Image (cartoon, rainbow, N blue to C red):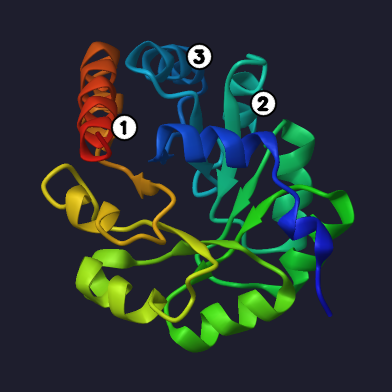
Amino acid sequence: MTYLSMNIPGRSMFAIAKQKLMPVVIINDVSQAEPLREALKEGGVYTAEITLRTPNALKIIRIISEDPDFCVGAGTVLSPGDADQAQSAGAQFMVSPGLSLAVVDECDRSAVPYFPGVATPTEIQRARDLGFNELKFFPAEALGGAQYLKAVVAPFHDMKFIPTGGINLSNVDSYFAVPQVLAVGGSWIVNEKLLASRDFSAITSLTREAVSYIKSLSS
């Protein structure tokens, strides 16, 4: 079965492709939601993946989604219930660490963009057969980094990937050297220490630095 809605470009796809960077955020303090969104925007990023790893993740997604200029997605979507609740909270795209047919069915039913995670040629082929053109590649560094990614995705010239896991400014250039890389996901911009200290100015600085560096790679 081919899930045709998976191929329909959405606002989330446009935002991710434009900035080539998707911050992956683990956050539980609801009071940090709005200042975090503003810090990312000030740094030049208008989309982020809020992982469903904390009790207040859905509340945070709801707050962030109140800004029509910001495209917020839900990460660590492991079940149809996760996808349904995240969309109800305002999430505009879903991301999973792996490929779940149950989540595929739910996202197809609700016509919300879904980025399942893959790690092997077999998983990529399976996702392609289902109609996916864009996939999360996870965990990138643990699997062998950009060298492994380049080898694995070489046969899939018509697909795009968002590698995530262990990526930062010290290795991001190697990932963008792979033609099939659409964007990179990373947690180094919004890390646990900066959130704990509420250092949103540092988050803005890291965001601006990442945006500038990634832009320079394509110039």
**Badge 1 local density, few (<14 within 10 Å), some, or many (20+)?**
many
Question: In whole angstroms, how far apart are the C-alphas of marks 2 and 3?
Answer: 10 Å
Mark closer to the chain start, 1 or 2:
2
Decide: few, some or many residues near mark 3? Use Cα within 10 Å; few <14, some 14-19, many ≥20.
some
Name the residue beneath numbered marker 2: 62
Write the residue at 76% across / 71% down.
102
**To which quarter of the image does residue 89 belong?**
top right
Task: Tell me the residue that label 1 is attached to.
Answer: 190
Residue type at the position of mark 2: Arg
Do the CB atoms of the residues marked 2 and 3 lie less than 8 Å apart? no
Find the residue positioned furthest to the front. 219
Q: x%, y% of residue 134?
A: 57, 59
Q: Is residue 67 visible?
A: yes
Q: Quadrant of residue 74?
A: top right
For marks 2 and 3, the one nearer the N-term is 3
- Residue 152 placement (x, y as % from top left): 36, 80
| Element carrying mark 3 | helix
Q: Which residue is drawn at 69% across and 80% down?
A: 129
* Disc ID at residue 10: none
Measured as percent of width and height from the top left, residue 17 is found at 49, 40
| Residue at the spot of label 3 | 34
Q: Which residue is drawn at 82% across and 63% down?
A: 4
Q: What element carries label 2?
A: helix
Question: Which residue is nearer to you in this view: 209 or 157?
Answer: 157
The x, y position of residue 30, in whole percent, is 52, 22
Asked if 142 appears above or below 110 in the picture, the reply is below
Residue farthest to the bottom? 122
Q: Which amino acid does label 1 sit on?
A: Val
